[in-house]
Image (cartoon, grey):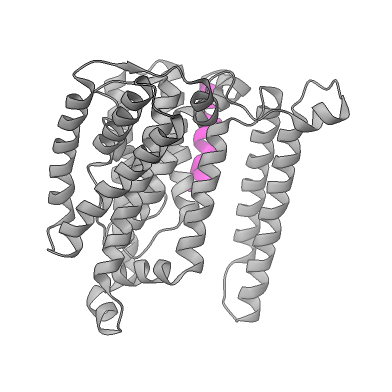
Amino acid sequence: MVIALVVVVIFFAIATGGGSLKPGSINNLISQNGYVFVLAAGMLLCILTGGNIDLSVGSVVCFAAAVGCVLMDNKVNMWIAVIAMLGIGLAIGTFQGFWIAKLHVPAFIATLSGMYAFRGLSNVVLQGYRVDITNSTFLFLFGSGRTSYIPDFIKQMTGSESSLNLTCLIFGIAATLIYILMTVRKILVQKKLNIHQSIIGQSITTLLISAVILFLTWQMASYRGIPMVLIWIALVLGIYQYITTKTAMGRHLYAVGGNEKATALSGVKTRNVYWFAYASIGLMAGLAGILTAARAKGIDPTYGEGYEMDAIASCFIGGASAYGGVGKVSGMIIGAVLMGVINQGMNMVGVDSNYQKVVKGLVLLLAVVFDVLSKRQKR
């Protein structure tokens, strides 16, 4: 998928005359797809439990954002509104997890009903009209406008007159070095445990990803620096990477997806695993609602439509199995970036919106077919 991503980026760079690689385009790619990364991280946990999905997240995003915007419009403290949006998302996720985990209602049905119910409640809260946000602090912390960037502290302290954002450059170089060191450590551990993995393949992947990080860093430093939304994305992805690789709950998620009955017989409370997964995606829907409202500087009853499909597609394209038990946060990131590049590239080329949906559908179908054929070959 890394190679596929590189090929797609090169294709659209040629098709747009280099326009897709300009600093402004890269900034828009991050800003426009912030909600995808957040929702896809939570969706991955649901998929790991056995290919289950949450169809209600788009409606929950709209409902949580609607409540928060109405509160701020009525002069309620910004932080109370933020906590309310996160709390609503978590409460809805826990509520839907109850039906799935406790009463064994199929996840598709439980979340489909939620998709209709919370879309209707969004209209009730907004009374069919758009509500705007004027709180500058909220827009700075969670938005993606001209002012929603981390200040260049290094340039301020040193008095440098460089046209580049030095803080952004330092962060990018540090992130690249950390990624390389983690990969080297992983290879050494594999060698120590006699785990046979292609060192050449891992090295090539590491070099490609490192080059991408440095390129993006340079482009962002040439623009306005690090957008605030990128901080929230990195925080969410870091937490979910830790959950899926370093915690008992992460191992239980993979185990349930691999063989739920065997996992239950081993003493794991599978009900709690489902509950955790759906409470998690609910919380992420609340955060996505915050980011969406801040980016649009308001909310209207149509926001969030199709968000669930973008999140699901990112997970499957990134290598998550439709049967559960297989999938990584790193793969999901690649899938989300690939979807974002395709969306932005087709917009810049001028492809009709209807054909864009056709292309995204075919990409998703190919990803799932690849997963099915791979499993059949292993058997």
Identify which residue is drawn at 25% across, 47% down.
92
Compared to residue 258, the image places residue 5 above or below, namely above
Residue drawn at 50 percent across, 49 percent down: 237
Q: Which residues are magenta?
A: 1-15
Seen from the viewer's position, the closer of residues 175 and 243 is 243
Query: Which quarter of the figure has residue 219?
Result: top right
- 174 versus 168 height, above or below: below
What is the quadrant of residue 187 in the picture? bottom right
Q: Residue at x 57, y 70 (%)?
A: 197
Q: Position of residue 110 (x, y in %)?
A: 15, 50
Q: Main secondary structure of the magenta part?
A: helix
Instruction: Give whichever of 128, 318 is nearer the camera.
Output: 128
> Residue 346, percent across and down?
41, 23
Of residues 210 and 151, the one drawn nearer to the viewer in this rendering: 151
Identity of the residue drawn at 44% across and 25% down: 294
Relative to 16, say whether 369 is above or below: below
Task: Locate residue 226, reporting x and y percent.
Answer: 63, 32
